[in-house]
Image: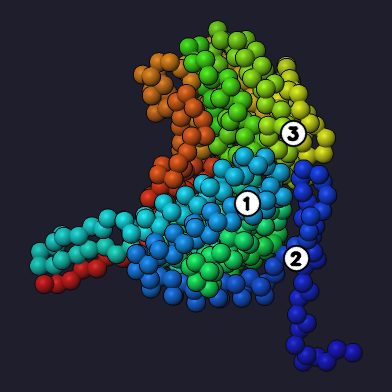
């Protein structure tokens, strides 16, 4: 019989879960998700790391972040192998993304020294005032499986540059490259400044409930709403996916079709800002369907892009395709076994079709048409997500007018997915709020303090 005053038994550790290579469906290792004890320990140590890290001058933080970028570049092949094992990305995609990660840390290394220009001056008679921008403390970052290392860098690089410590939880299926990043961060930045916390959804919930000062989350709208509710008064930065409209006018340039096919199938379409909903005018609708069908046929799964990441995502993709009321469903050549899905075009759909209203997150384009530009714009803005959009036309004046009227945080003209560290990326509506990339992202991870001195 258990003694009535005995301390409660410690919670049982989580059961190990298999890590699967999406290219083959075979196990490539296992993961034991972190639970309350490990989460509390990681956050507590990060609190110590934050005290040391914020004490460094911007120059010293720059030097150390540059050293981390050096390590990423020195171990490029290892990072690429880990990214490919967890995501199935082609080597060229993974290599480009790892190089971009190194560039991001270099960009924010310099941004740490530029800082945010403070307000200073005599706003009150006989007083001098200025604003200090201070780090928030410990940031809990939760990142998805579609770009494991890159999304971690989008969150961690500006947070670190601003003087915070970060505890980052990678997705359950793709912890590998983030764990290596934390190991290299310990060498370059110091212990406990950047900590990896591999785990599952319960690990993420525990991190949100822990003693972190801020939560930065990239993932689904449903999970983001749950995190915002649990965060209480703490700051939350949310990037919650998209469903990008693509307005293709009759005078679209010749490269439109190949560019959209490439952007739609990059990372197997598993990109929040990927082109998703092509909207034409009635007069160029059939031309667009034919041209996109031909262009997608040149992008083959198994050769030009990888598989979907996991069985849940594959099942969701299949459900949306099966539920669509599209009059035409055209699959391109390519692998369709296991988690592989070929590029697909769905044409002539109602506005409320699930493949239109929901983020499909796969190598798929829907094609709708409207009688005029006003109707086309209404279709473009008729979804709850508002992350990215593009316009394709030779008429620059018309293009700029449409970009101003599209409800999206990032817009392109005659291109799509053209991004760089210097330009901000942000969402509206159910795509979340907050800013990734650019020096504006530094303010996501800082708070102002006004100082006023009587003279």
Q: Where is residue 157 in the image (x, y as percent from the top left)?
A: 47, 56
Q: Position of residue 373 (x, y in %)?
A: 47, 16
Provide the secondary structure element on which disc 3 rests: loop
Q: Quadrant of the C terminus?
A: bottom left
> Circle 3 sits on which residue?
302
Say which mark, if any, is on residue 32. 2
Residue 5 lies in what quarter of the image?
Answer: bottom right
> Circle 1 sits on which residue?
77
Residue 18 lies in what quarter of the image?
Answer: bottom right
Q: Position of residue 384 (x, y in %)?
A: 56, 36
Q: Which of marks 1 and 2 is nearer the N terminus?
A: 2
In percent of the image, x 47 and y 23: which residue is there?
414
Instruction: State the residue lying farthest toward the right.
Output: 1
Density class for disc 1 (Cα within 10 Å; few <14, some 14-19, many ≥20) is some
> Relative to residue 121, is residue 263 depicted above or below?
above
Cα separation, mark 2 vs mark 3, equals: 31 Å
């Amino acid at each position: 019989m258990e003694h009535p005053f005995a301390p409660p038994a410690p919670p049982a550790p989580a059961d190990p879960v298999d890590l699967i290579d999406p290219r083959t469906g075979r196990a490539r290792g296992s993961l034991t998700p972190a639970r309350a004890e490990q989460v509390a320990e990681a956050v507590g140590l990060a609190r110590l790391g934050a005290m040391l890290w914020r004490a460094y001058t911007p120059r010293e933080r720059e030097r150390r972040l540059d050293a981390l970028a050096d390590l990423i570049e020195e171990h490029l092949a290892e990072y690429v192998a880990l990214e490919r094992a967890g995501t199935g990305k082609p080597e060229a995609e993974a290599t480009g993304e790892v190089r971009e990660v190194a560039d991001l840390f270099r960009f924010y290394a310099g941004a740490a020294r530029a800082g945010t220009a403070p307000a200073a001056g005599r706003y009150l008679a006989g007083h001098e005032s200025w604003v200090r921008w201070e780090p928030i403390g410990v940031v809990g970052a939760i990142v998805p499986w579609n770009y494991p290392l890159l999304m971690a860098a989008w969150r961690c690089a500006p947070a670190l540059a601003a003087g915070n410590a970060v505890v980052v939880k990678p997705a359950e299926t793709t912890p590998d490259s983030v764990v290596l990043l934390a190991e290299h961060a310990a060498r370059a930045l110091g212990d406990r400044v950047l900590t990896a916390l591999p785990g599952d959804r319960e690990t993420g919930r525990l991190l949100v409930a822990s003693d972190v000062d801020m939560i930065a989350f990239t993932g689904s709208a449903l999970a983001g709403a749950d995190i915002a509710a649990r965060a209480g008064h703490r700051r939350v930065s949310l990037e919650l996916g998209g469903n990008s409209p693509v307005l293709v006018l009759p005078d679209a340039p010749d490269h439109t079709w190949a560019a959209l096919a490439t952007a739609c199938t990059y990372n197997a379409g598993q990109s929040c800002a990927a082109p998703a909903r092509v909207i034409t005018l009635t007069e160029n609708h059939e031309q667009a369907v034919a041209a996109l069908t031909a262009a997608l046929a040149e992008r083959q799964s198994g050769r030009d892009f990888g598989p979907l990441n996991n069985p849940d995502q594959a099942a969701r993709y299949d459900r949306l395709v099966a539920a669509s009321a599209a009059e035409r469903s055209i699959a391109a050549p390519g692998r369709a076994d296991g988690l592989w899905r070929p590029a697909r075009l769905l044409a002539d759909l109602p506005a409320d079709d699930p493949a239109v209203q929901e983020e499909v997150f796969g190598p798929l384009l829907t094609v709708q048409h409207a009688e005029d530009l006003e109707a086309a714009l209404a279709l473009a803005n008729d979804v709850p997500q508002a992350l990215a959009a593009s316009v394709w036309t030779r008429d620059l004046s018309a293009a700029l007018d449409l970009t101003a009227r599209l409800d999206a945080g990032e817009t392109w003209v005659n291109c799509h997915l053209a991004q760089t560290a210097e330009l901000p990326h942000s969402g509206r509506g159910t795509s979340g709020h907050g800013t990734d990339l650019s020096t504006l992202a530094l303010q996501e991870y800082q708070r102002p303090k006004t100082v006023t001195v009587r003279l």
